[in-house]
Amino acid sequence: MAAGIRRIEAVTVERRRVNILKRKRGKYAGAAESAFKAKQKLSQAGSKTLMAGAQQLEKDLAAAATTRAGGGGAAAVAEESAGVAVCRRVLDGIKR
């Protein structure tokens, strides 16, 4: 009879130990999964921000090229400097 009780105790203790290990693994796996998902969300938000910035830069570049090609919308100023005719234009919105 005592041997049977010890066997039951051994089996139940082992099962309890296995269940505790499973719970711990599940807890760690859940924490790792949530950390991964949070990192993924940050990455997606960062890439959206970068794409929006790139699109804005492309628009600015196209506007600057149009302004430069069209003469900048400013009237040309003709001058003579040291006997040489010089034609200058001021381009609005172009930074040096």
Image (cartoon, rainbow, N blue to C red):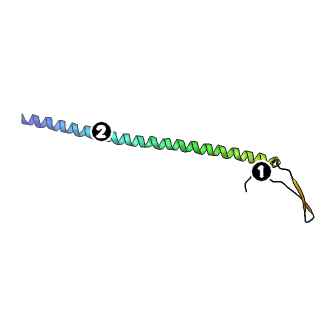
Q: CA distance from mark 1 to mark 2?
A: 67 Å
Sooner in the amino-acid sequence: mark 1 or mark 2: 2
Find numbered disc 2 in the image and state the secondary structure of the residue it sits on.
helix
Q: Residue furthest left?
A: 1
Nearest the viewer among 19 and 66 is: 66
Q: Position of residue 43 (x, y in %)?
A: 51, 44
Badge 2: few (under 14), some or many (20 or more) residues near its Cα, within 10 Å?
few
Badge 1: few (under 14), some or many (20 or more) residues near its Cα, within 10 Å?
few
Q: Residue furthest right?
A: 83
Which residue appears at 27% of the width and 41% of the height? 21
8 up-or-down from 67: above or below: above
Where is the N terminus found, in terms of image quarters?
Answer: top left
Nearest the viewer among 76 and 32 is: 76
Find numbered disc 1 in the image and state the secondary structure of the residue it sits on.
loop
The residue that disc 2 covers is 23
Which residue appears at 87% of the width and 55% of the height? 77
Where is the C terminus found, in terms of image quarters?
Answer: bottom right
Kindly identify the amino acid type of the residue bearing the numbered disc 2: Arg
Quadrant assignment, res 53: top right
Q: Position of residue 55 (x, y in %)?
A: 65, 43
Kindly identify the amino acid type of the residue bearing the numbered disc 1: Asp
Nearest the viewer among 5 and 31 is: 31
4 up-or-down from 67: above or below: above
Quadrant assignment, res 66: top right
Q: Which mark is residue 92?
A: 1
